[in-house]
Amino acid sequence: MREATRLLRERKAEEAEPLLLKARAAEPDAPDILNNLAAAYGLQGRVEQADALIRHLYQRYPDYLFARTNMVQLALRVGEIERAEALVAPLRTRRRFHVSEFAASCSAQLELLLAQNQAEGARSWLEIWVRVDPDHPLLAHWRQRLAHAGRPSLLRRFLRGRRGRAVG
């Protein structure tokens, strides 16, 4: 598992998959193994397999944080914002997290807030995450995504400023 998760962090899903399948053979119902296998499928573009495994994982282990946060992603992908909100809500009252659980929870919250067009709320969550884990590798991704979220583009601002003015 240790080697497989390292490979997944390096985005080497094809190399991680056989290790995860071997681990699954030894422990077929271990939620962490199933979660990482779903990640390996997803990284390889095998979205249907990843989604099916995520649904199975959540159905079997609804309190497993990573199953819940992955279900948030699935719900948002198909436009089920209310369902995603219901999945995220219990995470906001949780008092203790492993650092990796906190990162997954923050990512789910950020995705939800962006889907709800609440860019400022997402920026606030990102600030909280930065205070807790300032070196997390996903922070750069989220900073980039939020850099212009909720702000009108330069072209839109230009066109808005030109309305009602004579051209020429």
Image (tube, grey):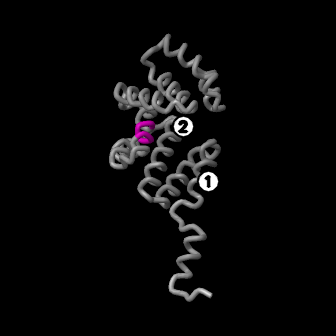
Check disc 1 and give the amino acid type: Gln
Amino acid marked by disc 2: Val
Using residue 55 as the reference point, say whether residue 164 is left or right of it: right
Q: Residues within 10 Å of mark 2 (few under 14, many from 20)?
A: few
Does residue 165 sit above or below 19 in this rendering? below
Query: In the visual, does 130 lie left or right of 72?
Result: right
Q: Which residue is mark 1?
A: 144
Which residue was labeled with disc 2? 99
State the residue lying farthest toward the front: 168
Q: Residue at x 55, y 33 (%)?
A: 45
Image quadrant where one finds the C terminus: bottom right
- Of badges 1 and 2, the one in the foreground is 1
Q: Callout 2: helix, strand or loop?
A: helix
Secondary structure of the residue carrying tag 1 is helix
- The answer to whether one can see residue 84 in this image is yes
Taking the spot 45% from the left edge, 36% from the top edge, the residue there is: 70
Separation of disc 1 and disc 2 at Cα? 22 Å
**Which residues are the magenta region?**
70-74
Percent x, y for residue 129? 54, 48
Specify the principal SS of the magenta part.
Answer: helix
The one nearer the camera, 139 or 7, is 7
Percent position of residue 141, x then y: 61, 48
Q: Is residue 94 visible?
A: no
